[in-house]
Image (cartoon, grey):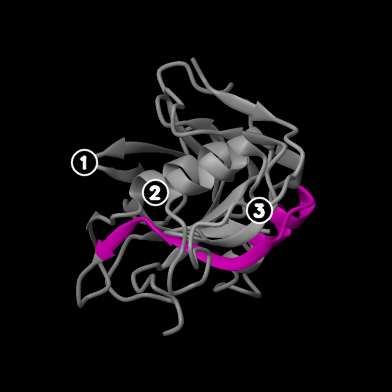
Amino acid sequence: MTNIIKKIKLGAPMSIGDKGTEENPYTWEEYLYLCEQGSWIEGFVEGCGYLYGIPEVLITASYISSQGPENDKVLTISQFSPYKASEPAGCLIRCREMLNSAGCSNSGGEILMCNYDANGRAMSSSAYFNNGLNYLDSQLALSHPIIVGVDYKNGHSTGSAWQDQATDHFVIIVGGNRSTGYYYYDPATSNRSRGTSDENIFTISNQRLVSSAYCMNSASQYIVVSIRNNN
């Protein structure tokens, strides 16, 4: 059964040494414990960046994906932002437009989901892969879409400040769960039906989130490299 904590009031912070700094972040388990106690306020969480406040709905580490949340998408088809020929490299901008339409924005943090090689290709899952799945589940439970960076070719389009040095393209996850897969909208196409198709779905394979890239001109495979955290 899904373990959900609803509308926990903030309490006094629980001190665990000098935890919560960027150099000494909380673990995901410590973060969940403090949320369960109503004591979480703010701080850095391993693999998740800086997190502020307790979500109104938090899916905890005891989340069991065999049931999972409903597959309802948190964005409507009318909220899809399509490819623009005048801005061919605008996938992140289009994803932010969709994110903003749901009342959300990026925090500037990231969760690295995959390791990568010198050619900018996704390899094995990172140590934060399960943290990333927990984050996706908790955000979708709040009806928040989530921008993710995907790898499908050599090289990358991310700056040197990011841990992720393999992302070539951005899409936005809009629903689903780890059992059935995560649905996403893809701004690689101007075709609204194609960009929002149920065929756009990430499933877990060898501890990675993968999908056939139906919206690209050539047959490709998307592998999620990183999650861009919401505020």
Q: Is residue 204 above or below residue 41?
A: above
- Which residue is at 63% across, 33% downward? 141
Judged by depth in the image, the label closer to the viewer, 2 or 3, is 3
Region of the chain picked out in magenta, as a range:
95-115
In the rendered image, residue 37, in percent from the top left (x then y), is placed at: 62, 37
Q: CA distance from mark 2 to mark 1?
A: 18 Å
From the image, tell me which residue sits under label 2. Answer: 213
**Picture quarter with the C terminus:** bottom right
Q: Is residue 110 above or below residue 33?
A: below
Compare marks 2 and 3 and give the one earlier in the sequence.
Answer: 3
In the rendered view, does 79 fall on the left or right side of 195?
right
In the rendered view, does 201 fall on the left or right side of 147?
left
Can residue 71 be seen from the camera position used here? no
- Which residue is at 43% across, 42% downward? 133
The residue under label 1 is which amino acid type?
A: Asn
The residue under label 3 is which amino acid type?
A: Pro
Judged by depth in the image, the label closer to the viewer, 1 or 3, is 3
In the rendered view, does 101 fall on the left or right side of 72?
right
In the rendered image, residue 177, in percent from the top left (x then y), is placed at: 48, 30
Judged by depth in the image, the label closer to the viewer, 2 or 1, is 1
Compare marks 1 and 3 and give the one earlier in the sequence.
Answer: 3
Assign a secondary structure to mark 2: loop
Q: Which mark is residue 13?
A: 3
Q: Is residue 141 magenta?
A: no
Q: Residues within 10 Å of mark 3 (few under 14, many from 20)?
A: few
Q: Is residue 130 above or below residue 118?
A: above
